[in-house]
């Protein structure tokens, strides 16, 4: 178990796809771009990002901010009829980046996280965002697990094979029959279920059926910002009662109803509210860097959160929990 060891973990980013959309930008900027080939639709060459768009999370920004482990998600939603190939293409790109540089280590266990930290490497957890990447097959789930994916978000905002997302909440739909099977299969494999984009009905369905605690990898508090992607106090308490963790995110319109009024101080308010409601053992950080999490400029600014919590009177042990120990404990319990 992790006791006095401090570890910093960020439970969500979209940095893989962002690097690919910028023409295969290396995660270590000291290395040259690789010659990329492959299907253009998968690689999003038709939807590139301008080179002026800043990268928020890569090797130097993680090191500057003391981020030990990050959860690297591939949101397959936009790939439509190409979900699985899109996911595998992204994982393959990232794996090649890890292999040629050595600064980042793919980790599939809590011990792997600690080993990466002890050897001066950055830990990376592979995430599939939107279970449509499984192509409706639990056999695909087994193979995704085999290549190292340890976290799956059942939906993005629309409806998926597994459940309704928050964009479908008015229908009252929750888990589908496949979604129910997926909960059990992920429990059996030791994979972490992410409810970040689920409809509220789906959230409760997962809590009722899962034997393991769950993560809301990037969300904020509905009591402070009435956005459907945020969790109500009732959800926060239920998440905590089952041992789960919410990763408070840096997306401005999840922090304040009026995006222009969102601020770093308001972000800290959300962290404090989650601590008050769910308890200090059930709150972490899920930036959504390179996917809309812009209230911090990049991962190099992570220490500002710890500083702000310290200035508001929180004890060091609580700050360590929020900055990563809670995510570590949950990952250890579910994934080993």
Image (cartoon, grey):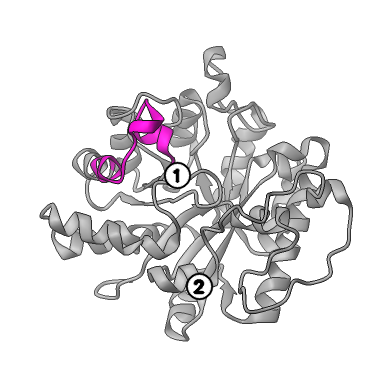
Q: Is residue 110 visible?
A: no
Q: Is residue 167 positioned above or below 36 on the image?
A: above
Q: Residue at x 61, y 29 (%)?
A: 163
Label 2: element kind: helix
| Quarter of the image with the N terminus in it | bottom left
Give the mark nearer the N terminus: 1 vs 2.
2
In this rendering, the answer to whether 308 lies above or below 138 is: below
Tell me the crowding category of disc 2: few under 14, some 14 to 19, or many 20 or more residues within 10 angstroms, Cα based.
some
Residue lying at 59% horizontally and 56% vertically, measured from the top left: 15
Which stretch appears magenta?
251-270
Where in the figure is residue 2, as x and y percent of width and height? 32, 71
Q: Is residue 26 left or right of residue 111?
A: right
Furthest residue toward bottom: 119
Residue 130 % position (x, y): 64, 40
Q: Is residue 257 magenta?
A: yes
Q: Give residue 328's quadrant in the image.
A: bottom left
Q: Was residue 98 drawn as part of the magenta stretch in this picture?
A: no
Q: Quick one: which residue is furthest to the left in this view?
A: 313
Camera-side residue of 202 and 66: 66
**Percent position (x, y) of residue 18?**
65, 53
297 relative position to 158: left or right? left
Tag 2 residue: 60
For label 1, the residue is 218
Local crowd size for mark 1, using a 10 Å CA cut-off: few (<14), some (14–19), many (≥20):
many
Visible in this render: residue 133?
Answer: yes
Number of marks present in the image shown: 2
Identify the residue at the far front of this view. Answer: 52
Residue 249 picture quarter:
top left
Label 1: state its secondary structure.
strand
């Amino acid at each position: 178990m992790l006791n006095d060891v401090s570890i910093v973990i960020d439970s969500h980013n979209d940095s893989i796809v962002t690097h690919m959309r910028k023409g295969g930008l290396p995660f270590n900027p000291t290395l040259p771009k690789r010659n990329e080939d492959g299907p253009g639709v998968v690689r999003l060459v038709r939807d590139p990002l301008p080179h002026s768009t800043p990268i928020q999370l890569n090797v130097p920004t993680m090191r500057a901010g003391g981020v030990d482990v990050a959860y690297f998600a591939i949101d397959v939603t936009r790939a439509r009829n190409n979900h699985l190939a899109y996911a595998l293409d992204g994982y393959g790109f990232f794996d090649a980046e890890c292999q040629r540089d050595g600064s980042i280590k793919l980790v599939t266990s809590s011990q792997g996280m600690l080993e990466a930290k002890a050897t001066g490497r950055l830990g990376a957890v592979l995430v599939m965002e939107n279970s449509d990447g499984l192509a409706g097959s639990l056999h695909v789930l087994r193979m995704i697990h085999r290549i190292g994916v340890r976290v799956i978000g059942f939906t993005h905002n629309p409806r998926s094979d597994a459940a309704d997302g928050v964009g479908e909440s008015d229908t009252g739909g929750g888990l589908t029959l496949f979604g129910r099977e997926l909960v059990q299969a992920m429990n059996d494999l030791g994979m972490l279920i992410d409810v970040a984009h689920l409809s509220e009905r789906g959230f409760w369905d997962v809590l009722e059926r899962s034997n393991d605690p769950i993560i809301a990898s990037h969300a904020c508090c509905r009591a402070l910002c009435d956005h459907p992607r945020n969790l109500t106090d009732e959800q926060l308490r239920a998440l905590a009662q089952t041992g789960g963790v919410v990763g408070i995110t840096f997306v401005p319109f999840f922090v304040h109803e009026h995006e222009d009024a969102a601020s770093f101080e308001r972000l800290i308010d959300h962290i404090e509210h989650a601590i008050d409601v769910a308890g200090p053992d059930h709150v972490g950080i899920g930036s959504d860097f390179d996917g809309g999490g812009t209230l911090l400029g990049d991962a190099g600014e992570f220490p500002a959160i710890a500083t702000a919590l310290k200035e508001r009177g929180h004890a060091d042990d609580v700050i360590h929990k929020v900055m990563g120990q809670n995510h570590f404990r949950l990952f250890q319990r579910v994934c080993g």
